[in-house]
Image: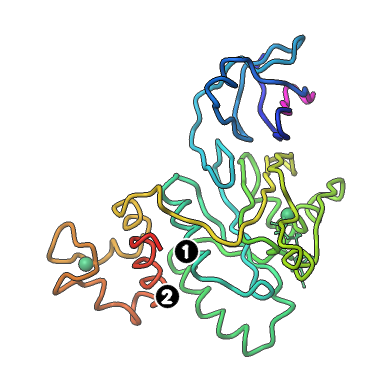
Amino acid sequence: MKGQITKINSDNYYVSSNDKEYICKLRGKFRKDNFTFKVGDYVIFNEKEKIIEGLEKRRNYLDRPNVSNIDQAFIITSLKSPDFSDNLLDKLLTICFINDIKPVICLTKKDLLGKDEFRALKKIISYYKKLGIKVIYNKNLRKIKKMFKNKTTVFTGQTGSGKSTLMNRLDKNLNFETNEISQALGRGKHTTRYVSLVNIGKGKVLDTPGFSSLDLTKYSDKDIKDSFIEFKKYDCPYKNCSHTNEKECKVKKEVGKGILKSRYDNYLKFIEKR
Ligand SMILES: Nc1nc2c(ncn2[C@@H]2O[C@H](COP(=O)(O)OP(=O)(O)OP(=O)(O)O)[C@@H](O)[C@H]2O)c(=O)[nH]1
Ligand SMILES: [Mg+2]
Ligand SMILES: [Zn+2]
């Protein structure tokens, strides 16, 4: 039978097939090879023995979060507590573009901002909108649900940004654990510990554990450069301009004008793999 992995809890693999759930183990060869399955994987399994025997080709995959076959990522970005981080946002955008995942910036905790704070952030947000990236607030539940239609959407973002809270609000039958961030951070651990794939409306959605930092070491400088989609508009005299030390680089000249300075600064950090 064919099914899809919806959750992995140590050596238990939850496989959904024709609206039924099977808790399966792995065939020995996968265990021997230390092969890592991912939530979202389509697998062939033996329904009587409840053993996973094969893996279908993945459309794409990420290691962190450990998911596969993703169409769209909701980058859950809190505006406050935890504070807005352009660095994490740009990192997640880079990861999305490299892996052919459509990013959506989903903003949370606007209610915690004062007017002036909001005005400053709004300027930054509008830059991303101009790049053609969809931006939505977490209170727009109906709009969000519509965006899930016929897609697999992963929720990703910093720990405490409100991923599980939004999942629970989108579907009253869900009951993912959530935690106040002072508590979550104070205990030094993340509230959500497993990736879960669930159906919401007419789509599939994955809640994932948050993170406090992310690294891009597995991606090449070229891939990172290409993920800064706005740089492509400028034709620098050198064909393979890295937009770092080249004289006459047009991208560098635009920083603080057509290019948001924090974007460019993050680009430099990312290629230095810091
Ligand atoms: N004021 C406010 N609080 C929010 C909002 N969204 C979520 N929260 C709160 O933020 C805290 C953290 O939310 P969670 O949903 O647990 O965060 P998470 O992203 O799932 O965190 P991890 O599972 O650790 O990755 C909870 O106390 C939520 O009630 C919001 O829009 N406004
Ligand atoms: Mg969570
Ligand atoms: Zn350049």
Q: Secondary structure under badge 1?
A: helix
Q: Is residue 21 above or below residue 173?
A: above
Three-letter code, disc 2:
Ser
Q: Is residue 132 magenta?
A: no
The reply to whether dot 2 and dot 1 touch (C-beta < 8 Å) is yes
Classify the position of the C terminus by image quarter: bottom left
Residue located beneath label 2 in the image: 262
Which quarter of the rendered image does ligand 2 occupy? Answer: bottom right
Using the image as rendered, state which of residue 197 and residue 128 is in the foreground: 197
Q: Is residue 115 above or below residue 173?
A: below
Three-letter code, disc 1:
Asp
Q: Is residue 260 above or below residue 131?
A: below
Dominant SS in magenta: strand
- The disc, 2 or 1, on the residue closer to the chain's N-terminal end is 1
Q: Would residue 12 be found to the left or right of residue 57 on screen?
A: right
Classify the position of the N terminus by image quarter: top right
Using the image as rendered, state which of residue 19 and residue 88 is in the foreground: 88
The spot of residue 223 in percent (x, y) is: 33, 51
Q: Residue at x 44, y 45 (%)?
A: 99
Using the image as rendered, state which of residue 216 and residue 2 is in the foreground: 216
- Identify the magenta region: 13-21
Q: Is residue 17 magenta?
A: yes
Q: Residue 3, which numbered label?
A: none
Q: Residue at x 24, y 78 (%)?
A: 253
Q: Would residue 138 be found to the left or right of residue 85 on screen?
A: right
The spot of residue 84 in percent (x, y) is: 59, 73
Q: Residue at x 49, y 33 (%)?
A: 59
Q: Secondary structure under badge 2?
A: helix
Dividing the picture into quadrants, the one containing residue 18 is top right
Q: Residue 90, which numbered label?
A: 1
The spot of residue 251 in percent (x, y) is: 26, 71
Q: Residue at x 51, y 80 (%)?
A: 123
